[in-house]
């Protein structure tokens, strides 16, 4: 499905820029027939080719992966992670686990889990909807927020929760990430995200492109360094 989205977005950008398929193919060093296969999803496009097109069109590589963001799925990811922390989790640590889940999914599957945007903040990447989601879940009685010294702790409320938007693969990825980080301090996960290429490549307050995680070393995508 993601391949179809990429192909349609490549075609859409070409048409918007007023290029023929032959002219677009020249950008990539492809014949018109081969390029036609790219737009018709019959010939896979490489990351290098996407970067060439993005540079030519003046857009981010993420533009080719664009799809509606799923805030409701993000909410289910949030609550699913809390299942691993019955006694609560620091708010900052929870924000980082959600980031790792979305970006790890993109690294493996070339699509994020939720599709929400993540912004570079002082303490690492934070979803643009994280604080709004926290307020909504608190107002709905699905979480409790407990002030502790120097932090806020998010505690799951004992209410039934649906996870119908999460696939078995989504749950597997979330389980793995939570298991790896459950005994790590918040400072450790903050430091980890600060050392990743997506965070380092962006300015404060800037949206972090999902595609930057593709450039990350495989051992530095989502797992603590000492595992």
Image (cartoon, rainbow, N blue to C red):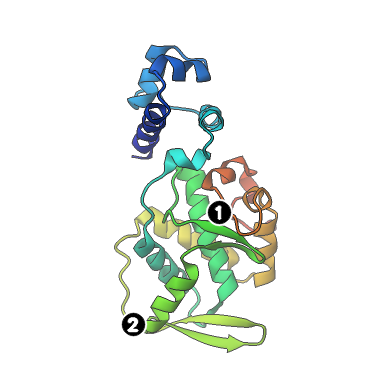
Q: Which residue occupies the foreground of this view, 81 or 26?
A: 26
Indicate whether 62 appears above or below 195.
Answer: above
Q: Position of residue 200 (x, y in %)?
A: 68, 51
Indicate whether 76 appears above or below 33.
Answer: below
Question: Across the whole image, how many numbered discs are drawn on residues?
Answer: 2
The residue where tag 2 is placed is 159
In what quadrant of the picture does the N terminus appear? top left
Q: Is residue 124 left or right of residue 109?
A: right
Q: CA distance from mark 1 to mark 2?
A: 33 Å
The residue where tag 1 is placed is 207
Q: Quadrant of residue 14?
A: top left
> Which secondary structure, mark 1?
loop
Residue 37 visible here: yes
Q: Residues within 10 Å of mark 2 (few under 14, many from 20)?
A: few
Indicate whether 220 appears above or below 87.
Answer: above
Q: Is residue 185 left or right of residue 62?
A: right
Q: Earlier in the sequence, mark 1 or mark 2?
A: 2
Looking at the image, which residue is at 64% across and 53% down? 199
Q: Position of residue 6 (x, y in %)?
A: 40, 35
Q: Pointers 1 and 2 in contact (CB under 8 A)? A: no
Q: Position of residue 173 (x, y in %)?
A: 46, 56
Residue 179 visible here: no
Q: Position of residue 204 (x, y in %)?
A: 65, 58
Q: Quadrant of residue 122?
A: bottom right
Looking at the image, which residue is at 46% across and 65% down? 129
> Which secondary structure, mark 2?
loop
Q: Is residue 48 left or right of residue 42?
A: right
């Amino acid at each position: 499905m993601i391949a179809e989205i990429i192909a349609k977005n490549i075609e859409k950008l070409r048409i918007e820029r007023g290029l023929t398929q032959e002219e677009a193919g020249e950008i990539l060093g492809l014949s018109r027939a081969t390029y036609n296969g790219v737009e018709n999803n019959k010939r896979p496009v490489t990351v290098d080719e996407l970067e060439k097109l993005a540079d030519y069109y003046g857009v981010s590589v993420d533009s080719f992966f664009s799809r509606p963001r799923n805030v409701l799925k993000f909410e289910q990811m949030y609550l699913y992670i809390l299942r691993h922390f019955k006694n609560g989790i620091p708010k900052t640590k929870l924000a980082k686990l959600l980031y790792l889940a979305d970006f790890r999914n993109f690294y493996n599957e070339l699509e994020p889990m939720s599709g929400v945007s993540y912004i570079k903040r002082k303490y690492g990447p934070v979803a643009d909807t994280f604080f709004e989601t926290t307020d909504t879940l608190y107002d709905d009685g699905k979480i409790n927020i407990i002030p502790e010294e120097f932090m806020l702790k998010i505690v799951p409320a004992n209410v039934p929760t649906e996870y119908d938007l999460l696939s078995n693969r989504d749950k597997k990825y979330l389980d793995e990430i939570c298991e790896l980080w459950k005994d790590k301090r918040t400072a450790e996960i903050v430091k980890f995200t600060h050392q990743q290429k997506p965070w380092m490549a962006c300015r404060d307050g800037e949206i972090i492109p999902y595609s930057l995680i593709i450039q990350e070393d495989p051992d530095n995508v989502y797992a603590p360094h000492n595992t």
